[in-house]
Amino acid sequence: ALLRAEGIRLPQATAAFVYVRVAELPAMGAVLLLALPAIGAALARSSRGVAIALTLGLVALVAAWIGRRRLRDQIAVLREKSADVRIGRAAFGAAVFYASLAQIETIVRQIAIAAAFGLPLTVSQSATVTALSIAGGLVPTIGSVGAIEGSLVAGLMMCGATADTALAITLVERAISYGLSTALGAASLAALGGRAILRVADRNRDAVTAG
């Protein structure tokens, strides 16, 4: 809505949103790689966990092999359809860079908050907690509220925190990442053109009222 209010057409506005999400994928992949040692250590404590992990990995490899041609065809079609909204490598590289900085900030923030509560987290452990919160964000709740918090608590307890400590760390973490960041984001939107949306809404409302 903000982009449309600034006069950007719907295809370009949609492409901008897609590029934002795609730019986050390399950083998410790096977080997952960092989390593998901690996840492997947790799974190694249970023979059932090892069996489940190996089974899921094998299923994923088989599925990727079977669907490789279809995926390649879909990528080719997508590239053809997105020719009019494609951006340069430099711009996309900058987007990936800033998305990576955001993930690094998340990992460092969690380590600092956990340390304040007496829980030492390694980079791998913090990456594991981050990976679980990303997975929790896929749960279809309003703003992912509840799902992410539950994932954070579970991840912290997996890293050795008690339930009380994990809950306290999660509350502070979400107060910063959700509360403070949302407030700063709202202020940024207002400064960068959010008022234009309000003006468009006012004009539409006046038109409906007049009609």
Image: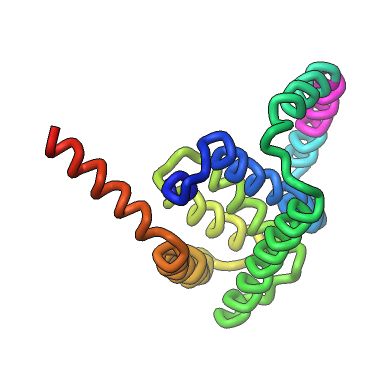
For residue 39, say whether it is visible.
no
Quarter of the image containing the N terminus?
Answer: top left
Residue range (magenta):
55-68
Determine which quarter of the picture holds residue 101: bottom right
- Residue 97 lies left or right of residue 106; in this view the side is right
Question: Whole-percent x and y of residue 96?
Answer: 74, 55
Q: Position of residue 146 (x, y in %)?
A: 43, 51
Residue 114 shown left or right of residue 49 in the figure: left
Across and down, in percent, residue 140 comes to: 46, 38
In the image shown, does 23 or 154 lie closer to the viewer?
Answer: 23
Q: Which residue is drawn at 49% across and 53% down?
A: 150
Q: Looking at this view, name the residue that lies furthest to the left.
A: 210
Q: Quadrant of the C terminus?
A: top left
Q: In which quarter of the image is residue 82?
A: top right
Position of 166 relative to 120 (above/below): above
In the image, 32 versus 185, the foreground residue is 185
Q: Is residue 148 above or below residue 67?
A: below
Colour mode of the rendering:
rainbow
> Any magenta on residue 102?
no
Residue at 64 percent of width and 58 percent of height: 130
Q: Is the magenta stretch mostly helix, strand or loop?
A: helix
Q: Can residue 26 be seen in this view?
A: yes
* Number of marks in picture: 0
Q: Where is residue 196 in the image (x, y as percent from the top left)?
A: 37, 56
Q: In this view, does 47 lie to the left or right of 174?
A: right
Residue 152 to residue 105: above or below: above
Residue drawn at (81%, 49%), measured in percent from left and top?
89
